Image (cartoon, rainbow, N blue to C red):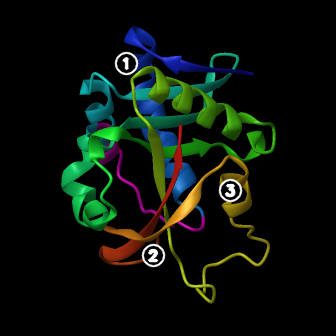
């Protein structure tokens, strides 16, 4: 296994597979995302275009089995400004860890920690003082919730992140099996570097 930041041609070569990974992994609980490859490719190009964004890849040989993205929160200001307005924290100080996706059979091997390590190290090297991410909030009694599901809260807290009181963004996507998009709340978590 190798986990590394992707740059140049390696990044260009990985974009389509990262898009496929996002669709596969986010189809799982709690996101239940009914993804679209064309949308994913456009979404990921924004990371390719941002000079301070990063994509980290996890490889088993030549096979991309996981990926994590990050960018300045200001790159997402249109999406998140309302959620952050009451915090008093300047958006330009925050690096946003947008997602971590990993094929199920590779979980529990420390790769999630490497995803965060590499993004946090990169954010610090770029002068950011805080790192944040957001996670979807689903009701405990949601009918699609697997009985064996364990939230990642303990993992995130163990890395020094804490949920930000009242800092919740709203996004729309189509859940698997639904006819149209619906709004979902996403809770922000943050830590200081």
Magenta span includes 40: yes
* Residue at x-position 51% and y-position 74%: 137
Magenta span includes 160: no
Residue toward you, 1 or 88: 88
Mark 1 = which residue?
Answer: 12
Element type where label 2 sits in the image: loop
Along the horizontal axis of the image, is 91 left or right of 4?
Answer: left
Point out residue 67 in the picture as x, y percentages from the top left corner.
Answer: 55, 34
Cα–Cα gap, marks 1 and 2: 32 Å
Point out residue 168 in the picture as x, y percentages from the top left corner.
Answer: 39, 70
Task: Count neighbours of disc 3 (C-alpha within 10 A) and say few if under 14, some if 14 to 19, many if 20 or more.
Answer: some
Give the label on residue 177, or none: 2
Element type where label 1 sits in the image: helix
Question: Which segment is the magenta one?
Answer: 29-41
Along the horizontal axis of the image, is 92 left or right of 142?
Answer: left
Mark 3 = which residue?
Answer: 157
Q: In this view, does 179 lie above or below 33?
A: below
Residue toward you, 29 or 96: 96
Is residue 174 visible in the rendered structure shown here?
Answer: no
Residue toward you, 91 or 174: 91
* Residue at x-position 30% and y-position 73%: 181
Along the horizontal axis of the image, is 18 left or right of 183?
Answer: right
Point out residue 101 in the picture as x, y percentages from the top left corner.
Answer: 57, 44
Cα–Cα gap, marks 3 and 2: 32 Å
Q: Which of marks 1 and 3 is in front?
A: 3
Q: Do residues under tags 1 and 3 come within 8 Å of each other at their CB atoms?
A: no
| Nearest to N terminus: mark 1 or mark 2 | 1
Element type where label 3 sits in the image: helix
Task: Count neighbours of disc 1 (C-alpha within 10 A) and say few if under 14, some if 14 to 19, many if 20 or more.
Answer: few
Q: Do residues under tags 1 and 2 come within 8 Å of each other at their CB atoms?
A: no
């Amino acid at each position: 296994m190798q986990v590394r930041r992707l740059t140049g041609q390696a990044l260009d070569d990985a974009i389509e597979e990262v898009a496929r990974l996002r669709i596969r992994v986010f189809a799982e609980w709690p996101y239940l995302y009914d993804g679209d490859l064309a949308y994913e490719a456009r979404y990921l190009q924004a990371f390719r275009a941002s000079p301070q964004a990063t994509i980290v890849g996890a490889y088993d040989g030549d096979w991309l089995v996981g990926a994590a993205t990050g960018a300045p929160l200001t790159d997402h200001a249109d999406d998140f400004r309302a959620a952050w307005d009451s915090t008093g924290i300047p958006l330009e100080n925050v690096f946003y860890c947008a997602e971590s996706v990993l094929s199920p059979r590779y979980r529990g091997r420390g790769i999630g920690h490497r995803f965060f390590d590499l993004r946090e190290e990169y954010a610090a090297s770029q002068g950011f003082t805080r790192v944040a991410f957001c996670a979807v909030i689903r009701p405990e009694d949601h009918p699609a919730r697997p009985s064996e599901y364990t939230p990642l809260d303990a993992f995130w807290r163990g890395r020094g992140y804490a949920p930000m009181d009242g800092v919740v963004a709203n996004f729309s996507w189509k859940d698997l099996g639904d006819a149209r998009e619906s709004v979902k709340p996403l809770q922000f978590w943050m830590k200081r570097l």
